[in-house]
Image (cartoon, helix red, strand yellow):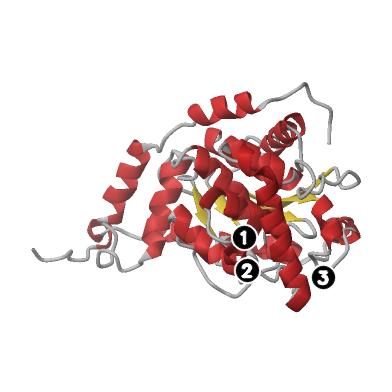
Amino acid sequence: MPERPPASFDEIRALVRELPGPDLEAASAAAAREAQLTKPAGALGRLEELAAWLATWQGRHPPRIDHPRTCVFAGNHGVAARGVSAYPSSVTAQMVKNFIAGGAAVNQLCKIADADLRVYEMSLDRPTRDFTEDAALDEEDCAIATAYGMMAVEPGIDLLCLGEMGIANTTPAAAICLALFGGEAKDWVGPGTGVTGDVLARKTAVVRAGVDKHRANLSDPLEVLARLGGYEFAAIGGAILAARLARAPVVLDGFACTAAAAILFAIDRHALDHCIVAHVSAEPGHRRLLERLGKRALFDFGMRLGEASGATLAIPLLKAAAACHSGMATFAAAGVIGKVD
């Protein structure tokens, strides 16, 4: 990661307070056009909602998706040494090389979606600390990682799809959810890369131990991020904030990505209004997390790969929503009789 000046949580809090709201003029224009299109009202279901959402958060009407970007943030976790994953931490760097070589699932999905793929290595040679023993990150490293994530949002991007890669990162994801929303560790812990039996029990115990270790400091969501999260979690949060400022709607991937976003939700219930969730992960805690966030995923395909695969798969669906909204004829233009009152 590039060197940056010292950063702090106060800067992040100030940024959240300055987030722009929805563009109501664009939203009104979308609603007015939707009412005139050659179809019964509501006949396209969620496609209509998605078109309106795109217009509202792009701040323009009609909405369009010309320059979508998929970002994958990769980080390593000290807690992996506890044996909570089916794979060693070295796989994170190996998978990053696979992304760069074009051999991963997300590469193929970006091709069919005509999306720009960017992969960000987050200090892979310097994993976070084991959160059962110490805070995963200190405040400055966490804030710098957030700022680094903001750099992924460049001018011209009109849709941002976010995901992550990091062996063992469903463990900090579960810990973040437990810290933010309560319950029992077993409510949030799932198989991740496919662990079962004793390994799954160990993973659950690690999540419980981590939250218990830091419980006195978990009233602040940013402390939850630093103590239990990781570099890629912080970077995802930064990308979400920068996208809001840049009027780029955001598509979130699965469990770990949504857990990262949940930090912002815990700070401000409206911080994720410009975000949708692509899919319901097969990781069981994700469905519970979506309920807490009030989000309804676009599809449920039993996916749990990560690497922004689900978020990228949503791009063609969003393009279809924008195309129908923008390209369909109105009743007047087509010479079709509208609904009789």
Q: Residue 11 versus residue 148: which sits nearer the camera? A: 11
The residue singled out by tag 1 in the image is 255
* First along the sequence among labels 1 and 2: 1
Asked if residue 235 shows in the view, the reply is no
Q: Are marks 1 and 2 in contact (CB under 8 Å)?
A: yes
Q: CA distance from mark 1 to mark 2?
A: 7 Å
Kind of residue indicated by mark 1: Phe
Q: Residues within 10 Å of mark 3 (few under 14, many from 20)?
A: some
* First along the sequence among labels 2 and 3: 3
Q: How many numbered tags mark residues here?
A: 3
The residue singled out by tag 2 in the image is 283
Kind of residue indicated by mark 3: Ala
Disc 3 on helix, strand or loop? loop
The residue singled out by tag 3 in the image is 86
Q: Are marks 2 and 3 in contact (CB under 8 Å)?
A: no
Disc 1 on helix, strand or loop? helix
* First along the sequence among labels 3 and 1: 3
Please state which of the two labelled residues, at mark 3 or mark 1, is closer to the viewer: 3
Q: Position of residue 241 (x, y in %)?
A: 58, 37
Residue at the top extreme, as displayed: 5
